[in-house]
């Protein structure tokens, strides 16, 4: 924890150490559906070593599935975001069957089990003890009703549920907590980089550094609206000479990624200043360098769980323009740390406003970095997860009694 001293708020570090005096040597199991691609996997890669270092026996397991399984879970994901999908009884049965097979191969014994998102939620049927918590990372504020109600019968068997944003939470007969995701300030994706390394990354991707750079880092997903980003850029390009970068990595649990990537390439064809980068998993230093090289960072999501790329960019002192969706409004204070937008035209207007006001951009960047320090660093999320676990183990006790 000494590595975070002077970076993270001191109160977070003190509470973590006190919690670990109670939870030390106990087992904490996390289960999701992929080790690469997306914020969940990234957080787990960073969080588990911290938990182990402070004395918690943390494990991370992945549920295995075939193409049919991930096609089904993508439909479930889209339906929970509000898109109309038809999910048949046979599909639900297959979803359960794959989880049943995984339950036979995964050691589910742990003092606390955190199940991430809908893919492994039926594993609760095979609980072997401990405190089971469902962690929902996606926007379920306006879900397709029948899909949510089907999943709800699993969710209500957990001891607790955790959501990223309060409006995602649903009234269920179990304890519910709001815990936003976080970034690790000392990871390769967020650590300080030299100017030479930043320039070297741009040269490797053949991106000129002689003009302002507009960047969006995200999976190639329609909910991230990459086509809308290109439309906004083309409007800006009529007045401001600048470059657009769309960068993302594939996720093993997203079968639509390649289709969307091809759509984006086709829409950008003929625009030499639009750079579309499909990065391999764990390209953290490259993403870091691209964010630091950028003038403005976008996250123009139409639907969003949280959108950690917003905090990543703010930590690097960049003004951010984001869609007013999911957890993005928790991170962007409109007009202070960046701008929230609702349309292509609004995005183009705010890009030009920042490009034409460098002092405002600098001020927003500095304010945003401090806002992230106080709210969205990984030590705060470790503190919150351990606090939930402590509260479930010690019902009736006030955590302040620690």
Image (spheres, helix red, strand yellow):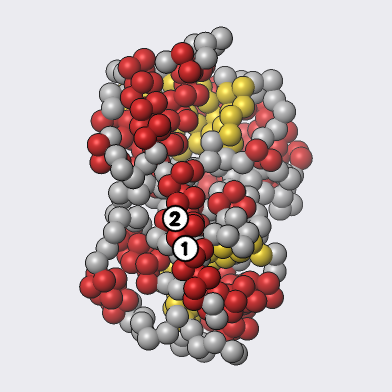
Residue occupied by mark 2: 369
Observer-nearest residue: 315 or 84? 315
Q: Badge 1 is on which residue? A: 365
Viewer can see residue 248: no
Name the image quarter holding residue 207: bottom left
Q: State the separation of the CA atoms marked 2 and 1.
A: 6 Å
- Quadrant for the N terminus, please: top left
Residue occupying the far right of the picture: 145
Whether residue 184 can be seen here: yes
Q: Position of residue 141 (x, y in %)?
A: 70, 43
Residue 37 percent across, percent down from the top left:
43, 53
Label 1 sits on a secondary structure element that is helix
- Give me the disc on residue 328: none
CA neighbours of label 2 inside 10 A, class few (<14), some (14 to 19), many (20+)? many
Q: Are marks 2 and 1 in contact (CB under 8 Å)?
A: yes
The one nearer the camera, 9 or 320, is: 9
Give the position of the C terminus as an image quadrant: top left
Taking the image as shown, residue 145 lies to the left or right of residue 239, namely right
Asked if 198 appears above or below 168 in the picture, the reply is: below
Quadrant in the picture for residue 111: top left
Percent of width and height locating residue 124:
54, 23
Mark 2 lies on a secondary structure that is: helix
Q: Position of residue 377 (x, y in %)?
A: 42, 44
């Amino acid at each position: 924890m000494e590595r975070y001293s002077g970076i993270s708020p001191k109160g977070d570090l003190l509470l973590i150490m006190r919690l670990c005096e109670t939870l030390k040597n106990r087992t904490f199991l996390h289960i999701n559906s992929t080790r690469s691609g997306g914020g969940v996997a990234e957080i787990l890669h960073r969080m588990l070593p911290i938990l182990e270092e402070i004395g918690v026996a943390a494990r991370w397991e992945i549920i295995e599935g075939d193409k049919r399984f991930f096609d089904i879970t993508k439909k479930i994901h889209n339906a929970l975001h509000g898109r109309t999908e038809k999910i048949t009884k046979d599909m639900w049965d297959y979803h359960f069957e794959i989880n049943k097979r995984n339950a036979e191969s995964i050691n589910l014994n742990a003092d606390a089990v955190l199940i991430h998102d809908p893919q492994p939620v039926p594993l609760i049927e095979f609980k072997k003890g401990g405190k089971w918590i469902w962690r929902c990372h996606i926007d379920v504020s306006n879900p397709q009703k029948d899909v949510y109600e089907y999943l709800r019968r699993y969710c209500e068997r957990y001891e607790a549920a955790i959501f990223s944003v309060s409006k995602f939470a649903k009234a269920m007969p179990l304890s519910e907590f709001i815990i936003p995701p976080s970034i690790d300030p000392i990871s390769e994706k967020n650590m300080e980089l030299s100017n030479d390394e930043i320039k070297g990354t741009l040269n490797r991707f053949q991106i000129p550094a002689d003009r302002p750079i507009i960047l969006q880092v995200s999976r190639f997903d329609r909910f991230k609206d990459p086509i809308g980003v290109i439309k906004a850029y083309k409007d800006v390009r009529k007045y401001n000479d600048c470059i657009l970068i769309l960068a993302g990595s594939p996720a093993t649990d997203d079968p639509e990624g390649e289709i969307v990537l091809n759509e984006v390439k086709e829409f950008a064809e003929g625009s030499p200043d639009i750079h579309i980068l499909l990065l391999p998993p764990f390209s953290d230093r490259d993403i870091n360098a691209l964010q630091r090289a950028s003038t403005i960072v976008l996250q123009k999501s139409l639907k969003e769980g949280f959108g950690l790329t917003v905090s990543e960019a703010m930590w690097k002192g960049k003004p951010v323009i984001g869609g007013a969706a999911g957890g993005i409004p928790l991170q962007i204070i409109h007009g202070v740390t960046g701008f929230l937008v609702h349309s292509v035209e609004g995005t183009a207007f705010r890009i030009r406003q920042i490009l034409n006001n460098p002092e405002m951009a600098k001020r927003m960047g500095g304010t945003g970095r401090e806002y992230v320090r106080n709210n969205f660093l990984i030590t705060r999320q470790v503190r919150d997860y351990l606090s939930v676990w402590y509260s479930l183990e010690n019902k009736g006790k006030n955590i302040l009694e620690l």
